[in-house]
Amino acid sequence: MALSPSLLYGLTGLMLFVIGLAALFTSPQLLGKILAVNIMASGIFLFLITLAHGSGTLIDPVPQAMVLTGIVVSVSSTAVALALLCRIEAAARPPAHLPKKKDEARQG
Amino acid sequence: MAWQNWLLLLILLSSMVPGLIIFTLAESNRGWRTALNLCGAVVKMILVLVMIIGISQGQRFAVALPLLPGVDLVLRADPLSALFVALSSLLWLFTTLYAVAYLEDSPNRSHFFGYFSLCVTVTIGIALAGNLLTFLFFFEMLTLTTYPLVIHRGTAEAMAAGRVYLLYTLTGGLLLFLGVVWLYVLVGEVDFSRQGLLMPLLDGHRPALIGIFCLLISGVGVKAALVPLHGWLPRAMVAPAPVSALLHAVAVVKAGAFGIMRIVLDVYGLPLTSGLGLLMPLMLVATCTILYGSLLALRQDNLKRLLAYSTVSQVSYIVLGITIGNPLAIMGGMVHLIHQGIMKITLFFCAGNIAETLGVHAISRMNGVGRRLPLTMGAFTLAAMGMIGLPPLAGFVSKWYLGLGAINQGEGWLLVVLVLSTLLNAAYFLPIIYRAWFREQEGPWPKDSGAMGLWECHWMLVVPPLLTAAISLLVGLLANSTLSPLAWVRFIVTTRYEPW
Amino acid sequence: MVSPLLQNGEPGVLLLSMVPGLPLVVAFMLLGRATRQTGLQLAPWAALPALAAALLLQPGIDLEVAWFFMGGRMGIDEVGRSFLLLAALVWGAAAWFGRGYLRADPRDHVFFFFYLITMAFNFGLILAQDMLGFYLFFGLMSISAYGLIVHNRSPEARRAGLVYLVLVMVGEVLIFSGMVVMASRLPDLELATIAASSSGGVSFFLLLVGFGIKAGLVPLHVWLPLAHPVAPVPASAVLSGVMIKAGLLGWLRFLPLGQESVLPGWGGALVLLGLLAAFYGVIIGLAQQEVKTILAYSSISQMGVMTMLVGCGLLAPGHGPQVTWAVSIYALHHGLAKASLFLATGMGTAKGSSPAASGQLWLLFLPALSLAGLPFTSGAIAKFVLKEVVHALPAPWLGILTFVLPLTALATTLIVCHFLKQMAAGLPHQSAPSPAMRLSWLLLWLSSALLPWVWPQQPAYASQATEAALLWQGLWPVVAGGMIMMVSWRWWPVSRHLTVPAGDLLWLVWPSHKELARKDEAQAEKRLFSEIKAGGRARQLLDFFPSQGRRWEKKLRRWSLVGAAYLLLCLLFLVMLFR
Amino acid sequence: MNLSPDSSAWIIWPVVVPLLGAVVCFLYKKKPRLAGHFFAVVTCGTSTVLGWQVLSQGVGRHLLGGWSPPLGISLRADGPAALMVMMTAVTGLGITLYSGGYFQSRLAGDSQDHRFRAQEQSFWPLWLLLWAALNGLFLSGDIFNIYISLELVALSSVGLTVLSGKPPSLVAAMRYLLVSLLGSLTFLLGVGFFYKAHGTLELAVISKALAPTPPVIMALALVSVGLMLKTALFPFHFWLPPAHANALAPVSAILSALVIKGSWYLFYRFWQGGGLLAAVGIVPALLGSVAIIWGAFQAFSQQRLKMLVAYSTVAQIGYLFVAFPLLVDSAGQGRDALFYFAISHSCAKAAMFLAAGTFFLQLGHDRIRDLAGVRQLLPVSSFAFALGGVSLMGLPPSGGFIAKYLLVSKAISQDLWWLALIAVVGSGLTAVYVFRAVSSVLSPHLLEERPLLVVAASMQWSALALALLAIVLGIMAPLPLALLEVT
């Protein structure tokens, strides 16, 4: 099977997904995990875009609509995650005499 | 036609509705609570009477509610259920009366009476269940409604007893559930009125039938306190006396025995059960229970605990009667359902009375109680003698038919069992009677709530045991009259089980 | 002769139901504080309906009470009439006696309560014409007699009561079993049916032993010598005079007397057992000091004779009615005589203290020696009918019994002489008897002396029994016995050389006073403690699992583990779907 | 589908009304409670009408704005969907009534007025949004829309989780969010594969034509694992108990009773056809069995009531998956069992969490050991808790019993004995932990602690109403089962 561009893009997308996955599972930092999720999302979007190319010359609009919507969802969820992270940091910071708790919190 | 259908529901509702209302009443609202309870009990008695008269005139009472596609919740009154219903509603009336006085000043009375009424409702439901699933339905509900009653005192001991009770009964419930579902998968609706339903399966599904039987019997056997499964019963006696009375005489234990009756007689039918070779093992279990329960009772010093072990032993008379499988023995077993109930409730009433009035719980401290509480101990004596099986009390009638049935069936060894059981019963009941009447009081009572007017203690504590004791005398003395339980049981056996 | 005046009909039925009914009503009057005194006044008269029924009612009156118990039938037949007369006389006289005897007892109403219900049940069992009715009253009578035995609440009384109760319960279940076995073969349970059927084997044995306990059959007699001395005198009188006869009546009613093809072996055994009891009772009785115990052993001995009679009934086919009749005559004679002797022990004072007392002692000779069959006493008639039965026996038994019977009379003479001597030697101090006591005793004495002469339906026996040839046969054992006793008193007093505690055989199995073994408090507490400890250990064990569970649950929270699970599951799905 | 595309325009209302409500509540900050109640009632009404329509007229289908798929949004209401919408409506209404009382009591009883007011202001819009998203999820006809609703559900529930503001709840919410994202992204990847395989996003088409081609297999694996993650099936349950137990009382109920049902429902939707299930049905069933036992065990080990209830959810999720092998044959009993578990669990669990929340509010703690005697203080809530427990145990009369009956009888008739045993043993284990809590709650001790504040009556009675509904489900089974038949 020849390595067509769409296949290449698709595989790259999947690779990105897997890399994000690995980061999500191994990153000790919450921020790292959030970024990992973003990378996974990007990978999926790439994968979806390749689907639009498909077999014929006609570009399928559906995956593009999906990706667009997906990006919106991804952005908003990232925003929620970041806001949450800020609250966690804020909650963990004031009791300075409890540094351990902060670490725990970061690890989620 | 319509009123016959409504009647069964009304019988259920006559205790359920008061129960639910009582839950909402304030703790201090004693008058309404008592009135509701007694009204419910009396109304139920009347309805049950109407039903029994109807049945004896050949009317049919049934009501069905679709539970699932192909599975109905059926209430049906056949003569056997009428027997149990009559027992439950009669004893409920007495127990209510007793409980009102017994719990005079204790906390949580609304709660208690609410569950109490629900418990009776469920028992009636068990009695009226027209098919196996309906039976299971109410049987499991019984566990739930009795649990709060068992732990009603709230002491550590009561809570522990509650745990043990749940452990046993819920496990039993699960076994029963499994058996019931299995049977439903095999044959579909298992209606009690369709006899010989399982006969066609005898060839192909023998192991399955045996397995189901074991599941079903061990499921109901927990409540019937068959011997390896009886552990909860003696512990559950920490409950207040009216609860123990109801538990032992009517609700839980009887429901188990009734279930065994239904399973052996109506679901499997005697021919199939004996064809599968299951009667004999069950009979052995019953005899072991009879003897073991009595042996353990012999060792007890706590009166209520002794009575609990005595229940273990006595209830297996019922099972024994069924497993002998002879019309006479079945009569003996069935009528013992009533007789044991009446006698045992008397005993528990009296035990509660002694504990409540004098603070005496141990048999070794009961010297001279008869002098202080002559009426109570009189009732106790009658009931205990009945338990032993002395004529003309209720217990004798059961024993006689059991013995006769055993001999006719060629199981002469069972007579030895009956004899041993009688002697053991005498050995643990007579010392109590002896202490109460023929020994002098040693030292003051732990407490004494004093006589009340004409009565030795609160009249509502004395009248119920006296009435039940009188009934236990009358059902024996008038056993041959047409109104006695024996006559009804004879009617059941001749109309339904005579062919075998 | 007394002729039946009342026929079947309303008055007869009423009288019949009053026989057990009146004592019961009076007994329950004693329970209420308000009616207690009236009840006590009425107590001696409660036996009157029974007496009237025995004298006036036509044998054969029969009353079916279908609703009662398990189908009841009450009535009077020939045997029942004789037993009822005995019971009515003894119970009535003893009650009258008891009113005086217990006049200082604060718990006399308790005594009379038990007395009257026992009496009612005793009458009931005599009247019962069906199996379960008989069993019902028999059981009730046995149980309620417990209250009579333990009346004085002494340790000895409690022990006697316990022994009695245990044996009663054993007898109860034996009779129950026997009746169940018997009933399973019968179409109905009426006595007439039972008499016509032949029962053998198991039920025969069960009923024999079951009723034998009440009848004092050796070796089940042990309760008798224990119970008699401790019970109040009127209670001893009815116990020995009437109640042990209930066992006898049970035999008569339920054993297949005089029928063909029933176990002759059993009959022989019963005869031998009876003879054994007749001599055994005397030997042990001679070793006793206490007058009531001596009488009890005499009863055992006499019941042995009656047992032998019943055994003869089993040996002699076709002579069933004759045996039954003989037994009832013997029972009547023995019951009246023994009861009057017992009552005498309740009014004896130091010897010769008053003319009345010494006169009474002399009067005692009559019932005492009549037991031995002295001519012209009721005993002579009894011995005569006994011999009549024996004559009907087959060969070996006829010879043996003709030889042995005079010896039993001799033995009886020995024991009554021993009794009279003890009586003459004086009794522990008792208050002087009231006139009512004297009167009731006299009544009993008179009926003992006269009644057997007038009562039998065939007075021919009375005249035959006084024939000259028989006089000697009756006289020599008494004379010989009296001489033997004189000799022994002088040179070899038996009771000094032979001491056997009352209850003889019982001492082999139950030597000392033992309370029922009840676990005591300390033991109970110890067990509770160990239970708690075990509970604690169990809790520790139980806690092990949750703590481990929490640890593992924490591990499951790690992201790395989640990742591994994620990948693994994805792979699992893929592999399984590709397969 | 030979139905006309617009056979039922009513379908949109259960989605639109709560969405509108969320907006109104967000804007009308003065009295969000009033608006919240109003829209909840209306939503409940529209859902009921929808259920009735489906029952009487069959499957309904609607194209939003007349646009046809693939670009337009299609809504489809068949029996299972309608049942889930109804479940959400009824449970949601109960929770709404409870929440009203909950916030009212807290505002009345505490000086920290400001914080609670802020909490309430965020609660109502988020809750209505979540409701809208859930309804959208149940009613969506294509899987991408489903993805969107899934994300909406996740985001709004994370929002709800953090409302309590306690540090543990923040951490739990974070973890919840990450897991959700992981799950929905995995799901999205699966959606991509489905699109690749079938060229359509229509769920009805996809779930009917599951052929074992590589993309479909890939898609199924991803979708399944993603949804399992979101449903917190063992071993992915790790995020659930802290998130559920540390949230506000109504939120715990929402999360446990409703939210997990969304992703579970999707899982069912993908596998409903049976087909490939024969190969892999064992996987969810095994995981479900482990979940039943592990969850029950953990629940038993907990010291806090809300943790116990949360772990009980873990165990009950096991029940939701254990019956999947039974879907293989087309007779609907397996499906009936699953959905009956879902709806009765929803009512019962909501009742239990609400009651537990009431205890917490009243006593300031939820240590099981110290709860003894709470019955005197809160009789109705205690009763509700116990009744909910009855349904969880599967004792009659309760929805749980019917579900257990359906499951076990189906398992036996298919000779899946281990499954029947697991179900029975599981209900026994459930009884063990439920009674651990119930015996404490119902014990007749006298309580020494003084109540912190006066609890509104609506809090007690709404919990009881839900619990009673779980019980009533046990005797009115024919109705929901008839609705399920509409496919």
Image: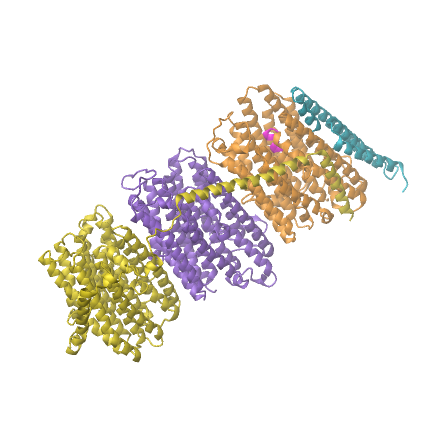
Specify the chain shown as yellow: C
Q: Residue furthest right?
A: A2
Colour scheme shown: by chain
Q: Would you say B366 lies left or right of C96 here?
A: right
Q: Would you say D69 lies left or right of C58 here?
A: right
Residue D249 is one of the magenta-drawn residues: yes
Residue C125, position as x, y percentages in the image: 28, 62
In terms of secondary structure, what is the magenta stretch mainly?
helix
Q: Which residues are magenta?
A: D247-254
Q: Colour of chain A?
A: cyan
Residue C20 is one of the magenta-drawn residues: no
Specify the chain shown as purple: B
Query: Where is residue D198, by image quadrant?
Result: top right
Please tell me whether residue B66 is drawn above or below residue D444 in the rendered image: below
Residue D477 visible: no
Q: Residue furthest left?
A: C355
Q: Colour of chain D?
A: orange
Residue C15 visible: yes
Please tell me whether residue B235 is drawn above or below residue B289 in the rendered image: above
Please tell me whether residue D356 is drawn above or below residue B489 in the rendered image: above
Q: Residue at x 60, y 26 (%)?
A: D35
- Foreground: C365 or B296? C365
- Foreground: C116 or D337? C116
Residue C57, position as x, y percentages in the image: 20, 66
Residue D232, position as x, y percentages in the image: 67, 37
Q: Would you say B275 lies left or right of C551 here?
A: left
Q: Would you say C540 lies left or right of C251 here?
A: right
